[in-house]
Amino acid sequence: QLLLQESGPGLVKPSETLSLTCTVSGASISSTSYHWAWVRQPPGKGLDWIASIHYRGRTYSNSSLKSRVSISVDTSRNQFSLKLRSVAAADTAVYYCARLAYSYGPDYWGQGSLVIVSS
Amino acid sequence: DIQMTQSPSSLSASVGDRVTITCRASQGIRDDLGWYQQKPGQAPKRLIYAASNLQGGVPSRFSGSGSGTEFTLTISSLQPEDFATYYCLHHNSYSFTFGPGTKVDIK
């Protein structure tokens, strides 16, 4: 069974960098048929796609966050990671990682990781 | 960018009711659309993919239809465990856009 698990600090100070890692188990991240994505959901609000990556390294990001986001993949550890620079209170959210199937959209999701931006 | 809208934004219904939620895309998206259910504190769960295909393990009271710019999610007989927020989602091969959500609560 495919499982995704987010990990990283739950509290980040304003202006610093938010870093999260998603560990994939039960399947290889090195599949040509999928991208791997990050999504966030501020408290009480809807869901927003942040960025995606293919195991070969091609990346895509939401234009609203593009200047602050980087996404990377480590195939040896079956993980992919998110960095969001210069965070502010508005970046407080539950961050999810997900698998994105080419033809059918996101199918598997992590349980989510709450990140609070506060001094 | 393609924008997704949903209606209604919320609804109150009783157990056993038939519920229909509509999703519209700002331009044609073929059938590149899914429906997701989210309960408080949980990750979204896919119910429907490719507009009308039922995800494995999802009860048959859920159904999806539509193509192009207008899509619907129907719950034929609402059950207590169905009270949640429902999102439509348009995807391409590397990104996706959620609708704003429809909250279904108990009348």
Image (cartoon, helix red, strand yellow):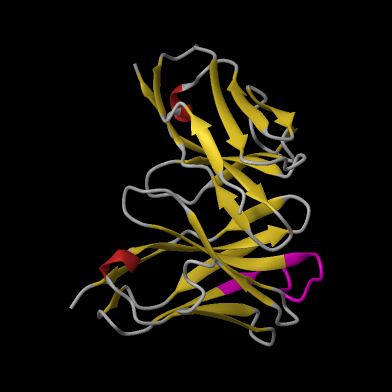
Residue span colored magenta: A23-34
Identify whether A86 is placed above or below B58.
below
Name the one closer to the observer, B28 or A41. B28
Quadrant containing the N terminus of chain A is: bottom right
Q: Can see residue B33?
A: yes
Query: What x and y, as percent, mark residue A63?
Result: 53, 67
Residue sitting at x 38%, y 49%: B41
Name the one closer to the observer, A86 or B40. A86
Identify whether A117 is placed above or below B92.
below
Is residue B45 highlighted in magenta? no
Residue sitting at x 34%, y 67%: A91
In the rendered structure, the answer to whether residue B36 lies left or right of residue A107 reads left
In the rendered structure, the answer to whether residue B91 lies left or right of residue B12 reads right
Is residue A27 highlighted in magenta? yes
Query: What x and y, as percent, mark residue A33?
Result: 80, 65
**Figure quadrant of residue B9:** top left
